Image: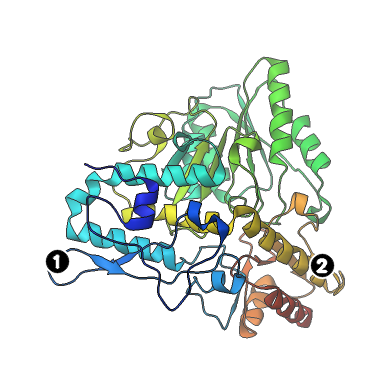
Amino acid sequence: MHAPSRRTFLGAGLAGVAAVGLTACESEAPSTDPSADSTPGPAASTSPTGAGSPTTLAVPDFDPADWESVRAQFPLDPEMAQFAAFVLSPHTAQVDAAIDYHRQRLAFDTEQALLEGITLEDTVRQAAADYAGGAPGDYALTDSTTMGIALMYGGLSLQPGDEVLTTTHDFYSTEESLRLLEQRTGATVERVALYDDPWQATVDEMVSRLVARVTPRTRVVAVTWVHSSTGVRLPIAEMGAALDGLAKAQGADIVFCVDGVHGLGAVDVDLPDLGCDFLSAGTHKWLFGPRGTGVLWGRKFGPLTELIPSFSGTANGARLSPGGYHSFEHRWALDQAFAFHQRIGRAAVVQRTVEQATQLKEGVAAIGADRVRVVTPLDPEVSAGIVCLDVANFPPGNGMLSLREQGIVSSVTPYRTSYLRLGPSIVTSPEQVDAAVEAIGALA
């Protein structure tokens, strides 16, 4: 079987399978972006023609330097300001085209498509490494953040007397996975509050509070990169460095695990530079990848035992990729999401997100804390794309419904203490941020 290179697949179709070209619509001029020669262009979709093999269906090209052109790649309702797109991402035209191509391949010659699955997964791992750093073998492929979290904590070998240190700010998936780890191993789970008021959270405070709760029995530290409850972003690199120092001083390893879903695609950093050991992230949030896809990145996979037999191999991340049948057309199309961000530029995407998030926070703060309190820190060093708000005397759910009536799509944090939540991104614009600020001011 011919193993296509990434460029062959992205640029000219899957060699040796079907003559499928990747064609841009003539109605839009090809990009003049100088990086276009080193990054893939749009993917092809396919459709059956009678009893024949799938054929090419062109999709629009876009200008990665034009934010309106970027936004046009999403099928979102243009009449609504989409500040909740990060919750479960819409697909770009490129991702949908790739999904359609793989779906048609599976339908036309299922056995051959499955045989090519390993090569296609390798393509996805390579795209992940190109985007987020490290080597392709550092990435296990999952269906969600929750699946990756279960693989992290379910695969650890602990014993009674060992401690897991986590925080009071984590999501249900981490809390439940740690409960099951505690039940399975007899290890004890301890919790620490990293901040009292999220608006005032600082790097030094969060690192010092975490380190202060580490004991000689601490074997695992479990945190979340960006808290979906408040929008606070943890200083993972600083925490990792501090934990490495403690581990050396104590002569015992500390495995540092991160739920990274609201950081991947919203923070400009290579994962190996974070200083953690494992990071799980669904790729159907800020990366705007295919729904039902995710990655588990590992600095070294040795500490983890696989929970589900792998169909992908026995080395590194492949060993931790759960086997079984998945929504393969979505998984195999994930490389197109990474390619989309690569073509725009990771730094440019993050800058666009952070600028709008800052604009939103500053605009709402000007309304007055007695009317609307900004929960998320203003400082981009301890925040990312999520912005949480507390509207005086106005339940978050009511606020979400009222904003929708005004064309502003928001969400509500699913926690005991609930806030109105907006996530500016590459599918929103500064003008829409201004409109959101005005609408939020009208709530109070």
- Circle 1 crowding by C-alpha within 10 Å: few under 14, some 14–19, many from 20: few
The residue lying furthest to the left in this view is 51
Foreground of the two, 235 or 5: 5
Q: Which tag, 1 or 2, sits closer to the chain's start?
A: 1
Task: Give the residue at x 57% y 27%.
Answer: 187
Foreground of the two, 160 or 207: 207
Q: What element carries label 2?
A: helix
The numbered mark at residue 362 is: 2
Q: Quadrant of residue 410?
A: bottom right
**Position in image of residue 341 (x %, y %):** 54, 57
Going by the image, does 332 lie left or right of 268? left
Identify which amino acid the numbered label 1 is placed on.
Answer: Gly
Image quadrant for the N terminus? top left
Foreground of the two, 137 or 209: 137
**Position in image of residue 337 (x %, y %):** 47, 57
- Circle 2 crowding by C-alpha within 10 Å: few under 14, some 14–19, many from 20: some
Q: Can residue 386 be seen in this view?
A: no
Task: Give the residue at x 55% y 31%.
Answer: 299
The numbered mark at residue 212 is: none
**Position in image of residue 402 (x %, y %):** 66, 81
Q: Name the residue under label 1.
A: 52
Going by the image, does 15 lie left or right of 386? left
Image quadrant for the C terminus? bottom right
Q: Quadrant of residue 174?
A: top right
Identify which amino acid the numbered label 2 is placed on.
Answer: Glu
| Image marks 1 and 2: residues in contact by CB distance under 8 Å | no
Task: Give the residue at x 32% y 53%.
Answer: 328
In the picture shown, does residue 123 fall above or below 441?
Answer: above
The residues bearing labels 1 and 2 have C-alpha atoms spaced at a distance of: 57 Å
In the picture shown, does residue 149 fall above or below 216?
Answer: below
